Image (cartoon, rainbow, N blue to C red):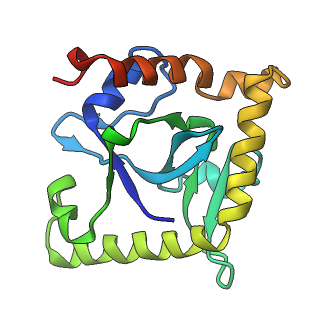
Amino acid sequence: MKWYIINKEYVSYLKEFDHKIENIDYGNKLRPYIGIIMEINNIKYYVPISSPKEKHHRMNNSIDFHKITDPITNHLYGVINLNNMFPVPDSEIKILRYDKLHELRRFDNDKDRNSYTRLLRKELNIINGIEDKLKNKAAKLYNKVINHQDEHLINRCCNFSLLEEKCIAYKDNEDYKK
């Protein structure tokens, strides 16, 4: 797997329809949408990662949440929020280039940028080691939500059906891409 970033305008467009889409813009500080891409039913889904919060240390991996934990040291580097995955057209996906991170996020100095790059590389290495597990979880979660099998999951997840419709509309309507 690779890291990807998603076009800010597309994320803003989807936020109009589903409040569970995470924020990307925090005033003067842009947080790039960094995540992985998984294909479910021939649709590309973007799965965001997040920095670990205190609550994540107490949480267990589940069908819609997975910790990015070093298998040797057990250090928690980040989390994958499968419940926040959303469909994305190819036109709105870019592969993250480490040498272009400074264009996406502000760093105080080269040391901070290099530390962040090492963190991303470490997280991606861990994710690649559990890729099949994550793909299986994403497919199961998607099916449970689409088929209305678990109300609790439906309430925690993005509205996959609606967002797929909006993704198609976005691809088909050039007016959205201003």
Left or right of 97 on screen, residue 18: right
Image side of residue 59 versus residue 10, left or right:
right
x, y percent for residue 54 = 58, 53
User: At 76% from the left edge and 45% from the top edge, which residue is drawn?
Assistant: 63
Q: How many marks?
A: 0
158 over 130 or under it: above or below: above
The residue most toward the bottom is 72
| Residue 41, horizontal then vertical, whole percent | 65, 37
Residue 35 percent coordinates (x, y): 45, 52
Residue 139 falls in which quadrant of the image? top right
Residue at x-position 74% and y-position 60%: 133
Residue appearing at x 21%, y 15% in the figure: 175
In the image: residue 112, left or right of residue 77: left
Residue 81 visible (yes or no): no
- Is any atom of residue 139 visible in this view? yes
Q: Measured from the top left, where is residue 45 in percent x and y?
A: 53, 41
